[in-house]
Image (cartoon, grey):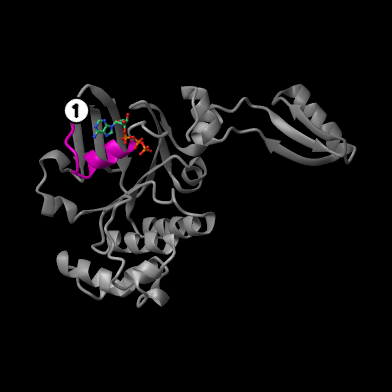
Amino acid sequence: MQSVIEVENLEKLYKNKQALKKISFQVRHGEIFGFLGPSGSGKTTTVKILTSLLLYTSGRVKVLGIDPGRSRPSEFLSKIGVLTDNSGIYERLSVYENLELFCRLYSVPERRIETVLEAVNLAENKHTQVGQLSKGMKQRVTLARTILHEPDILFLDEPTSALDPVNSGRIQETLREMNRKGTTIFLTTHNMQEAEELCDRVAFLNNGEISALDTPQALRLQYSDGSITVTTRQGKQLVQRNETGADLIKELMYSDNLLAINSNEPTLGDIFVKLTGRGLE
Ligand SMILES: Nc1ncnc2c1ncn2[C@@H]1O[C@H](COP(=O)(O)OP(=O)(O)OP(=O)(O)O)[C@@H](O)[C@H]1O
């Protein structure tokens, strides 16, 4: 499948701090790609470079065939959407007025507002002043603004980090829906559950280096120890995937003492710790 983001040996130096150490990866058209790493690993630096907000030191970067470091801002920014913490929504204006303002600024037809409000589930709140909305709803207004111009790629830096599970879930559902309609999504997070549920592929970033990159399922299988937990009326028991294990399960089934069988696949968080020796928080 066609790559919409290509990164090769990307390096970023802040004075003498090497924030990105020659990382390489590609993001395919139509996928949700997760960039996972703990605080300080280089996630925001990467997003800023990919969205032309920061210049890189060396390497090769292409986003939709354009080098963000050398792009014409108006042309490049019309193709992407960027959601970060400080997205500048006007608290004293209503939801609708905020979006109207951005429509005028970016020459987007006003009829897009209704579609976008439906997409982020805010149609009923369109006349509410943003200052009166909950944190989760504000984040959805910001998302609405980010997708107003129908970007080909959406960059999200920790989109749900400050939200409760209900609001996080709503944002995730909106992202899934947008992705189903063809938007490629590049997402940074240190929330492994979010990555596991949402992402087609994930990259683990640690100290400016990528230590693994694959689908969550492939990573779980690769780092699984192959054991199975069997639950019987007497309790839980660890069984290996071999002939002895199979015989035991067969015996438990015939004796009607088998309540459940679960494979012991590690979570993305477990794998991150295994690979890097540190957690994601
Ligand atoms: N403007 C800057 N000047 C110097 N060092 C910086 C600058 N911005 C970031 N860094 C350093 O670069 C490294 C990567 O930072 P970055 O913000 O990209 O990490 P992050 O993974 O996004 O972290 P967080 O999840 O806390 O936002 C960190 O060590 C950080 O201290």
- Look at the image and say whether residue 243 sits in the magenta stretch: no
In the displayed structure, would residue 98 be above or below residue 274?
A: below
Along the line of sight, the residue nearer the viewer: 124 or 23: 124
Q: Quadrant of the N terminus?
A: top left
Instruction: Assess whether residue 48 is covered by the magenta stretch.
Output: yes
Q: Which residues are magenta?
A: 43-58
Q: What residue do we see at 36% from left, 31% from top?
A: 41
Q: Quadrant of ligand 1?
A: top left
Would residue 197 appear left or right of 20 to someone viewing this image?
right
Residue in the picture at 28% in, 37% down: 46
Q: Nearer the viewer, residue 260 or 173?
A: 173
The residue positioned 83% from the left and 39% from the top of the image is 258
Percent x, y for residue 177?
41, 60
Report the residue marked by disc 1. Answer: 59
Position of 236 compared to 166: left or right? right
Question: In the image, residue 148 lies at what x, y percent?
Answer: 26, 64
Residue beneath the point at 80% across and 27% down: 247
